[in-house]
Amino acid sequence: MIGKITGIGTALPKYVMDNEELSTMVETTDQWIRERTGIRTRHIARNGETTTSLAIEAAKEALKAAKIEAASLDLIIVSTNTAIDLMPNTACEIQKEIGAFVATCFDITVACSGFVFAYNTVLAYMRANMCKKALIVGSETLSNVVDWSDRGSCILFGDGAGAVVLEEDDSENFKPLMSSMGAKGEALTLTNSFGKARDFMAMDGSEVFKFAVASVPKIIEELLMINQFEKEKIKYYVLHQANKRIIDAVAKRLKEPLDKFPTNVENYGNTSSASIPILLKEMDEKNSFKKGDYIVMVGFGAGLSLGATILKW
Ligand code: COA
């Protein structure tokens, strides 16, 4: 059993912050940010745009694209580390808004691996006959938790949401992979002091960089090996969009051509769990995918965590 993506939706805040604007806030330059990260602009939530409102907008668009009724969804999983409320969870807020009356709804907090963790969780539900149609949403307003005085991290992140409808399809069966390394958790943290103080994300950039460059090629190779799948059959590697240099390094280590690694980090920065569905939608709009194409998706980030999966278009 494998899931099939039948609809994609996205929502991006209207306000766009470029590197020039950032350089008026912290000691940095457009050139430094572009050379070290590939990022030029990011969207920032303002004027009532929230993690929930973006998630609902993306979810509605994905349902419309999939041409299904919300009431036919069995499962809604939202991946977010910037939920407005812990109770009710964001998935329940979406359920209420779209009328997905019978869906089981929960949020997960796996940061930048969250979309792939949610995707693989839906596959497990499908294999267990617990779900036929699911909605996965990655939504983040990281601008609320970024330390805007830390030039080593605030330049990287952006806000946005992406959603996919995943429907049961039994044409092929791939084993996905996920792993977590709690011992390395200090490299990327976001405290939760329940309103007592402002919570900020803190990051050891070079530690996270080294982790990504070493671990992402490894998990891809392991994924292909356990599924007895050759690299030549993969049309695209859709990686979490954290930093263009990480993506370039992964391609090099895998000895795969860069054009198999689409990127849009230039325009959005790192939108955490929203980055993969935002990229999928852009590629779909450009007709980059043909029916039957195989795509590897990989998420990596806080935890530290890693998730990988093979998707058939
Ligand atoms: N503008 C200008 N200079 C900056 C800067 C900025 N925005 N941020 C850091 N610097 C400086 C540092 O202070 C340091 O100066 P020093 O040599 O005088 O001490 C120098 O640039 C090099 O810093 P370093 O941290 O080694 O840079 P880097 O090449 O590793 O790039 C990151 C920093 C954050 C861009 C990079 O480590 C990275 O992308 N890491 C992964 C982060 C990530 O993806 N996190 C999310 C994962 S899901």
Image (spheres, grey):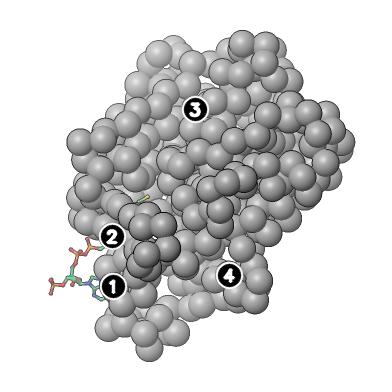
Q: Which residue is mark 2?
A: 202
Q: Does the residue tagged 4 have its C-beta within 8 Å of any atom of ligand 1?
A: no
Q: Which mark is residue 150?
A: 1
- The earlier-in-sequence mark between 3 and 1 is 1
Position of residue 161 measured from the top left corner of the image (x, y, whole percent):
61, 54
Q: Amino acid at mark 2?
A: Ala
Position of residue 162 measured from the top left corner of the image (x, y, whole percent):
63, 49
Position of residue 297 measured from the top left corner of the image (x, y, whole percent):
50, 35
Does the CB distance between marks 2 and 1 fall below 8 Å?
yes
Mark 4 residue element? loop
Position of residue 68 measured from the top left corner of the image (x, y, whole percent):
85, 35
Image position of 172 (left or right of 72): left
Cα separation between marks 3 and 1: 34 Å
Q: Amino acid at mark 1?
A: Asp
Q: Which residue is mark 4?
A: 45
User: Residue at horizontal 46%, vertical 72%?
Assistant: 40
Q: Closer to the camera: disc 4 or disc 3?
A: 4
Image position of 111 (left or right of 1): left
Q: Closer to the camera: disc 3 or disc 2?
A: 2
Q: Which residue is mark 3?
A: 309
Residue 186 visible, this orientation = yes
Note whether 155 is above or below 123 in the view shown.
below
Q: Amino acid at mark 4?
A: Ala
**Of the pair 105 and 46, the residue shown nearer to us:** 105
